[in-house]
């Protein structure tokens, strides 16, 4: 992997996002409203007395959900449909590296712009949240963002077999939303749902960083979660390599 070229690619993506910074800021209105609604609901039903850490949980994830959820990138499907992917493959910089570094740059920009939503939730809802917990969450969010980018890359490679990204995009988005803890922490879900979602990588994108930083899980569970998170990173990297070797065989000089 060419790290210098990767960093240039990442900085270029950040600069492009800066040009559309108001779109990104407006996009934070959805997680901001969702977090405030959930916190208000918890307090109206007095559930925050039974689960006092949930308001802080929603405050943490309010500004990071967009950066930490995987997605299928429509640009990859567009390159496949138009044949522009052939030109991308002859560049000296690896196509896969280009996707990964570009995805990291986009996620970091979303995380930065999402801080506005997080700060507003904190000021309006006043949850019990310390600076140390925020720092721990940001540290744990870094491998989560990397895993999310790898999953997005892997899912986007489906463009070599499926030309329409609409169906797969909705499927990945809904599955990730429910199983990652973006709507509810896994600890408050039914046991069967916890078992199913714990077998998927999405839990380690939002639920694990948030609950671990807030002390909602034991130290042993934190160690196990970190090990599982890095295991998923390794498994996804291997999967990308395997799928890419199959995908590249479908490319010819004339297209597919």
Image: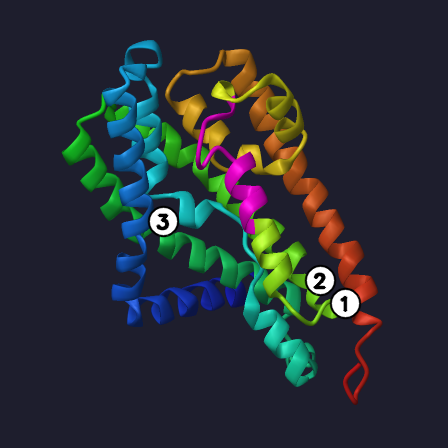
Specify the quadrant of the image occupied by residue 13: bottom left
Q: How many other residues sit within 10 Å of disc 2, few (<14), some (14-19) or many (≥20)?
A: some
Q: Is residue 253 above or below residue 39?
A: below
Residue 24, given in percent of the width and then of the height, sits at 31, 60
Which image quadrant: the N terminus? bottom right
CA gap between label 2 and label 3 equals 26 Å
Residue 32, given in percent of the width and then of the height, sits at 28, 44
Q: Does residue 61 show up magenta in the picture?
A: no
Q: Residue furthest left?
A: 123
Q: Nearer the viewer, residue 84 or 94?
A: 84
Mark 2 vs 3, N-terminal side: 3
Instruction: Tell me what residue is drawn at x 48 percent, y 30 percent.
Output: 207
**Tag 2 near tag 1, CB within 8 Å:** yes
The answer to whether residue 1 is visible is no
Q: Residue furthest bottom?
A: 254
Q: Name the mark on residue 111.
A: 3
The answer to whether residue 47 is visible is yes
Q: Name the mark on residue 158.
A: 2
Instruction: Tell me what residue is drawn at x 31 percent, y 48 percent.
Output: 114
Residue 26, given in percent of the width and then of the height, sits at 26, 59
Identify the magenta region.
173-186
CA gap between label 1 and label 3 equals 31 Å
Give left or right: position of 117 versus 237: left
Which image quadrant: the C terminus? bottom right
Judged from the image, the secondary structure of the residue bearing numbered disc 3 is: helix
Judged from the image, the secondary structure of the residue bearing numbered disc 1 is: loop
Q: Is residue 247 above or below residue 60?
A: below
Q: Nearer the viewer, residue 29 or 227?
A: 29
Q: Which residue is mark 1?
A: 161
Q: Is residue 98 above or below residue 153?
A: below
């Amino acid at each position: 992997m060419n790290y210098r070229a990767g960093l240039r690619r990442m900085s270029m993506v950040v600069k492009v996002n800066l040009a559309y910074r108001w779109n990104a800021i407006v996009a934070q209105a959805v997680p901001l409203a969702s977090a405030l609604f959930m916190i208000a609901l918890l307090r109206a039903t007095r559930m925050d007395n039974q689960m006092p850490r949930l308001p802080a949980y929603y405050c943490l994830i309010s500004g990071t959900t967009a950066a930490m959820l995987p997605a299928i990138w429509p640009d990859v499907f567009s390159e496949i449909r138009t044949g522009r992917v052939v030109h991308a493959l002859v560049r000296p910089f690896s196509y896969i590296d280009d996707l990964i570094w570009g995805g990291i740059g986009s996620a970091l920009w979303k995380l930065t712009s999402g801080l506005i939503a997080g700060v507003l939730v904190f000021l309006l809802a006043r949850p019990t949240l310390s600076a140390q917990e925020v720092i721990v969450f940001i540290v744990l969010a870094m491998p989560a963002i990397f895993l999310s980018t790898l999953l997005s890359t892997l899912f986007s490679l489906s463009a070599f077999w499926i030309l329409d990204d609409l169906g797969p995009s909705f499927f990945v988005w809904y599955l990730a939303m429910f199983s990652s803890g973006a709507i509810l922490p896994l600890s408050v879900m039914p046991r069967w749902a916890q078992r199913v979602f714990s077998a998927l990588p999405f839990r380690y994108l939002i639920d694990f960083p948030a609950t671990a930083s807030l002390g909602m899980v034991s130290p042993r569970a934190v160690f196990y979660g970190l090990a599982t998170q890095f295991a998923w990173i390794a498994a996804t990297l291997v999967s990308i390599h395997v799928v890419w070797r199959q995908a590249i065989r479908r490319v010819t000089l004339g297209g597919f």
